[in-house]
Image (cartoon, rainbow, N blue to C red):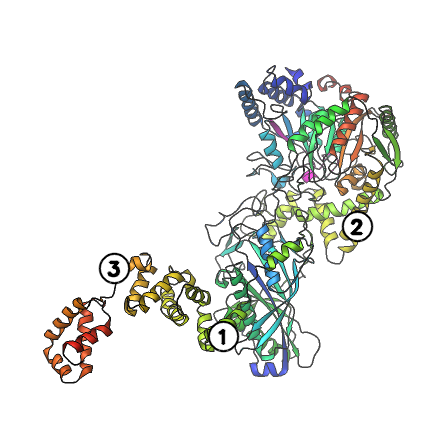
């Protein structure tokens, strides 16, 4: 049955819905795969075998009774990033602070998955509170990249991307604040999409930076991501920033794109997202991808986004500022870790000692940065200026999208580095997100799709495609066309067992 | 450890110093649900029963603004003659306290929904003072802490603390005045009159329960003094825990006398929060903070800006009722009341009830008499508010009509009202059930009169002899025999007829 894990979500859905296999068999195959390889990969923080099988059996019962599948993905299992709440199932956000916490409610994304009959295999590893680019900031140990277990799987959503690349799950959910879906997708040769801000509900997504956070779909193919995106997207009255507009037809756009015709599509290459600091193999892979887009009929032009150079700096003021406020609730009073509660310490001392023990170094660093940036007398210079940069970057995008339909760039400047290589150099770590952050600041949609392997180290490289807000369908059309022309990349990854 | 503060004689205070006030009033809105979630907004309830992931600040939960609360905020702003913002936002006010679930309060900072207004306040002698309003903004209430053990009920010395989040997220409007200066000795009275006027206005608008005793209206009084002739304000103190209108006046007056004593002695006032102590009318210093609080305000990213359309604001403007003090003036003129009669009416909270009773057909003097006297006593006896009595203005009007037509005596009317208050039905049902109609059948009365005259022949003789006032004893006997259901005047006529004295 292990070959079930090699199929795409779309293929699995068809087999389940036509009765060729049961959802329970599919789910069990993935649980078996997790049992076999996750000791090496460590993509999961918690596996919910019983919950997943229960959902799968309900789908099977429905189908056996002759009812239509409740969604196009009914019965296809999924790995959920541990930053989305799951009622009664542990949700740690990769932090000791929330060890043992059982949320009393489901995130809207979780609820929509349940309603769509998608079995949730478990919760995936991540950098603590989604702060990081390597999963090395997880309090529960890093995830390993299936391409090379000594290398990072990206972050913060490295667990989700690794679970796809290791064939532990055909679908995964990530969240992307500065690249946490796209960068892990790039370094594992999987597909990851950051939807338009407000396109997918944030209710139940434990906030890192509220104005940047966005949940999105991860898959091994563009079509699979589109199918998942359609399940989780749409207006949610529980999220005031959720967009009350119809979701574009994403799977249709992917199928249309897969026909391989990009005539009439204008593609802009962002001049500022290349050059110094970019690995040669990454740039060569990107150039080849651009050439491929031209072959598909796209018109390619170079565009300039002059303020993108300030994006990283602005991001590292806005995100820590919001995080310093969002994480204030972890005070040991109502849930989660509580230390020094021996009757001899005041509430303030209990809070302080709990945070000292419960938060990791990167979280503390960002809380301190943000507290400082928001403090009286510094607000205008830091947070205020960063918001102005944000406006300028949004204008850069608007001007570019007047000329072109989509923008492209490498997803990351380098291929996956070794675990431990950059843990002591936060600035080098932050530079991983230099290409992905502009889309978060402006709120528009962006995707990473595999663009092959770097010619110098044989490691995965991602092509980033960016579209205007609410035009997520363009990502799927262009992404699917490119994917079809370039051919699968992940297949080059040998069976993990064989590599051992 | 408390030390008795030195106080300056009030007359000397106002001779040497000019007081400056700033009043911050927090009003809990009486919306059905909380500010940012669907939990019920109601006072009381078992601890932590009106809570959900949103108002508990659970990880991942998000706020959604209560539209009715925004509507109330705009209406309050309009009633206070404020400008309404065309575009405004919420902001996060970051500070740690265990009864605040998110450790930030979702509030408004530099972009309040209403600003630059005023409220005209009538003092006891009829003088009108205009209090300028700085702003009115929306925010959420905190939960409540109960500190167990220790003498003071405050956190210091407590053995442990209990937290109740039922109040967390209840919609609040904070109304802040501009500095109120130049009031001299009347400053404490102005403070009370302002809060009173605000309370009456908000009650008339039906946006809040405005119960100071339950905390749905709370006043923080900022007080400072400056020497006569000075241009710069002195250092202020902010007094909290002021839980009644009378306390507002007392707290301001106390702080003025305390400040003056400190200043006159060459000392300086420490900018601090003080707590009013109802028992002895003094204030006590709160905990002094080593460092100034830095709330690190920034725009709330979980909420979208609020941009009320002009059409909506105009619609809401049309719902603003007449100012209570203007209305009182009109009623005084219409009903030709003395100042004292008006005050009784206002102080018992009977204005609306009397007006409604008049609308239901009663004469205003009768309506006023019932509500201000008998029903007010009934409310006191039943420990409830006048408006909460189980009788409607229409029912009171019906009783008044029955007295007017002679079908009820005043004494019977009170029994009818008691029956209504006890839930026995409307006035007619009570009359029916208790058999309380006046006996107006002369033949039935004559039998009772004859019986009474026969029982007291000596009295009958006296009446015949011209001592008409002796008839009172026979009237009393007849009334007793008819259980008070006879019209005493008619009984008297019948007695005089019977003995041939008429």
- Residue A266, horizontal then vertical, whole percent: 84, 32
Could you say which is closer to the camera, residue B330 or residue B275?
Answer: B330
Q: Residue at x 62, y 51 (%)?
A: B103
Could you say which is closer to the camera, residue B327 or residue A243?
Answer: B327
Seen in the picture, residue A376 relative to A443 is either above or below; the reply is below
Q: Residues in magenta?
A: A118-141
- Residue B241, horizontal then vertical, whole percent: 53, 64
Q: Please give the residue where the numbered disc 1 appears in the rendered image.
A: B333
Q: Please give the residue where the numbered disc 2 appears in the rendered image.
A: A388
Please say if the residues under marks 3 and 2 sit with CB atoms less than 8 Å apart.
no
Give the distance between the C-alpha atoms of the residues marked 3 and 2, in whole angstroms. Answer: 79 Å
Q: Please give the residue where the numbered disc 3 appears in the rendered image.
A: B434
Seen in the picture, residue A356 relative to B384 is either above or below; the reply is above
Give the distance between the C-alpha atoms of the residues marked 2 and 1, in whole angstroms. Answer: 60 Å
Seen in the picture, residue A252 relative to B271 is either above or below; the reply is above
Identify the image quadrant of residue A98.
top right
Residue B1 seen in this snapshot: no
Please say if the residues under marks 2 and 1 sit with CB atoms less than 8 Å apart.
no
Frontmost of labels 3 and 2 is: 3
Task: State the predominant SS element of the stretch in magenta.
Answer: loop
Instruction: Please state the chain letter of the residue tagged with numbered disc 2 in the rendered image.
Output: A
Instruction: Please state the chain letter of the residue tagged with numbered disc 3 in the rendered image.
Output: B
Question: Which dot marks residue A419?
Answer: none
Could you say which is closer to the camera, residue A202 or residue B403?
Answer: B403
Please say if the residues under marks 3 and 1 sit with CB atoms less than 8 Å apart.
no
Seen in the picture, residue B265 relative to B171 is either above or below; the reply is below
Quarter of the image with the C terminus of chain B is bottom left
Report whether A11 appears left or right of B199: right
Give the distance between the C-alpha atoms of the residues marked 3 and 1, in whole angstroms. Answer: 40 Å
Element type at mark 1? helix
- Residue B143, horizontal then vertical, whole percent: 54, 53
Of the two numbered discs 3 and 1 on the same chain, state the one appearing first in sequence.
Answer: 1
């Amino acid at each position: 049955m292990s070959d079930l894990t090699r199929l795409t979500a779309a293929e699995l859905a068809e087999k389940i819905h036509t009765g060729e296999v049961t959802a329970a068999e599919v789910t069990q195959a993935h649980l078996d795969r997790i049992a076999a390889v996750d000791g090496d990969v460590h993509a999961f923080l918690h596996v919910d075998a019983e919950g997943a099988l229960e959902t799968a059996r309900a789908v099977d019962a429905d189908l056996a009774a002759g009812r239509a599948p409740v969604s196009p993905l009914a019965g296809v299992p999924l790995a959920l990033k541990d930053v989305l709440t799951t009622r009664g199932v542990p949700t740690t956000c990769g932090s000791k602070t929330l060890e043992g916490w059982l949320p009393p409610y489901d995130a809207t994304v979780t609820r929509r998955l349940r309603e769509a009959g998608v079995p949730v295999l478990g919760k995936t590893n991540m950098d603590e509170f989604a702060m990081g680019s390597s999963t090395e900031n997880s309090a529960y140990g890093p995830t390993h990249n299936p391409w090379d277990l000594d290398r990072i799987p990206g972050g913060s959503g490295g667990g989700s991307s690794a679970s796809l690349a290791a064939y532990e799950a055909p679908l995964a959910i990530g969240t992307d604040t500065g690249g946490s879906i796209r960068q892990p997708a790039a370094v594992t040769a999987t597909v990851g999409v950051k939807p338009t801000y407000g396109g997918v509900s944030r209710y139940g997504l434990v906030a890192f930076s509220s104005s940047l956070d966005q949940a999105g779909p991860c898959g091994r193919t563009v079509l699979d991501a589109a199918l998942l995106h359609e399940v989780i997207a749409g207006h949610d009255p529980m999220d005031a920033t959720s967009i009350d507009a119809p979701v574009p037809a994403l799977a249709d756009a992917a199928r249309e794109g897969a026909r391989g015709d990009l005539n009439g599509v204008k593609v802009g290459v962002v001049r500022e997202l290349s050059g110094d600091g970019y690995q040669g193999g990454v740039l060569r892979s990107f150039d080849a991808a651009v050439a491929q887009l031209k072959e598909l009929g796209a018109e390619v032009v170079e565009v300039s986004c002059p303020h993108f150079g300030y994006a990283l700096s602005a991001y590292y003021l806005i995100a820590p500022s919001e995080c310093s406020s969002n994480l204030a609730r972890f005070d040991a009073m109502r849930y989660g870790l509580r230390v020094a509660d021996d009757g001899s310490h005041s509430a303030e001392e209990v809070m302080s000692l709990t945070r000292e023990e419960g938060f990791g170094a990167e979280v503390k660093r960002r809380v301190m940065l943000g507290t400082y940036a928001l403090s009286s007398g510094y607000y205008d210079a830091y947070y205020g200026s960063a918001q102005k940069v944000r406006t300028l970057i949004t204008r850069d995008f608007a001007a570019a999208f007047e000329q072109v339909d989509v923008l492209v760039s490498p997803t990351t400047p380098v291929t996956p580095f070794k675990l431990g290589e950059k843990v002591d150099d936060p600035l080098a770590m932050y530079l991983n997100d230099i290409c992905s952050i502009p889309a978060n600041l402006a709120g528009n949609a962006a995707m990473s799709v595999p663009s092959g392997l770097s010619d110098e180290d044989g490691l995965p490289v991602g092509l980033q495609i960016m579209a205007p807000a609410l035009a997520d369908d363009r990502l799927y059309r262009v992404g699917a066309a490119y994917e079809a022309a370039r051919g699968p990349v992940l297949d080059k990854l040998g069976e993990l067992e064989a590599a051992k | 450890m408390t030390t008795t503060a030195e106080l300056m004689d009030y007359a000397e205070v106002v001779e040497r110093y000019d007081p400056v006030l700033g009043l911050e009033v927090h009003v809990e809105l009486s919306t059905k649900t909380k500010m940012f979630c669907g939990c019920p907004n109601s006072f009381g309830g078992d601890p932590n029963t009106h809570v959900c992931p949103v108002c508990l600040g659970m990880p991942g939960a998000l706020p959604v603004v209560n539209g009715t609360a925004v509507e109330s905020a705009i209406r309050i702003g309009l009633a206070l003659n404020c400008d309404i913002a065309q575009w405004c936002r919420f902001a996060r006010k970051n500070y740690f306290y265990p009864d605040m679930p998110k450790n930030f309060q979702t509030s408004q900072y530099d972009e309040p929904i209403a600003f630059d207004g005023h409220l005209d306040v009538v003092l006891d002698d009829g003088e009108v003072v205009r209090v300028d309003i700085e702003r009115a903004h929306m925010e959420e209430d905190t939960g409540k802490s109960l500190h167990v053990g220790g003498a003071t009920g405050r956190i210091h010395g407590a053995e442990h603390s209990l937290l109740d989040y039922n109040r967390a997220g209840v919609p609040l409007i904070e109304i802040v005045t501009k500095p109120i200066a130049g009031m001299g000795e009347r400053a404490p009275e102005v403070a009370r009159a302002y809060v009173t006027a605000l309370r009456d206005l908000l009650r008339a608008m039906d946006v809040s329960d405005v119960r100071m005793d339950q905390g749905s209206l709370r006043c923080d009084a900022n007080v400072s003094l400056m020497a006569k002739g000075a241009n710069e304000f002195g250092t202020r103190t902010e007094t909290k825990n002021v839980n009644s209108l009378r306390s507002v006046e007392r707290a301001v007056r106390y702080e003025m006398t305390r400040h003056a004593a400190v200043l006159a002695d060459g000392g300086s006032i420490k900018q601090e929060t003080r707590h009013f102590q109802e028992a002895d009318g003094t204030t006590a210093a709160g905990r002094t903070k080593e460092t100034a609080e830095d709330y690190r305000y920034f725009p709330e990213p979980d909420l979208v800006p609020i941009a009320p359309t002009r059409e909506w604001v105009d619609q809401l403007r049309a719902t603003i009722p007449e100012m209570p003090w203007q209305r009182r003036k009109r009623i005084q003129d219409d009903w030709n009341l003395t100042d004292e009669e008006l005050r009784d009416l206002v102080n018992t909270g009977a204005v609306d009830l009397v007006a409604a009773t008049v609308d239901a057909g009663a004469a205003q003097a009768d309506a006023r008499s019932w509500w201000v006297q008998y029903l007010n006593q009934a409310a006191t006896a039943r420990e409830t508010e006048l408006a909460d009595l189980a009788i409607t203005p229409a029912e009171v009007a019906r009783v008044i009509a029955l007295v007017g037509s002679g079908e009820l005596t005043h004494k019977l009317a009170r029994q009818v009202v008691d029956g209504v208050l006890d839930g026995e039905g409307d006035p007619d049902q009570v009359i029916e059930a208790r058999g309380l109609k006046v006996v107006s059948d002369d033949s039935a009365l004559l039998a009772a009169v004859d019986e009474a005259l026969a029982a007291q022949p000596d009295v009958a003789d006296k009446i015949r002899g011209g001592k008409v006032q002796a008839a009172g004893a026979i009237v009393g006997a007849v009334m007793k025999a008819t259980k008070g259901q006879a019209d005493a005047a008619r009984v008297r006529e019948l007695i005089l007829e019977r003995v041939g004295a008429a």
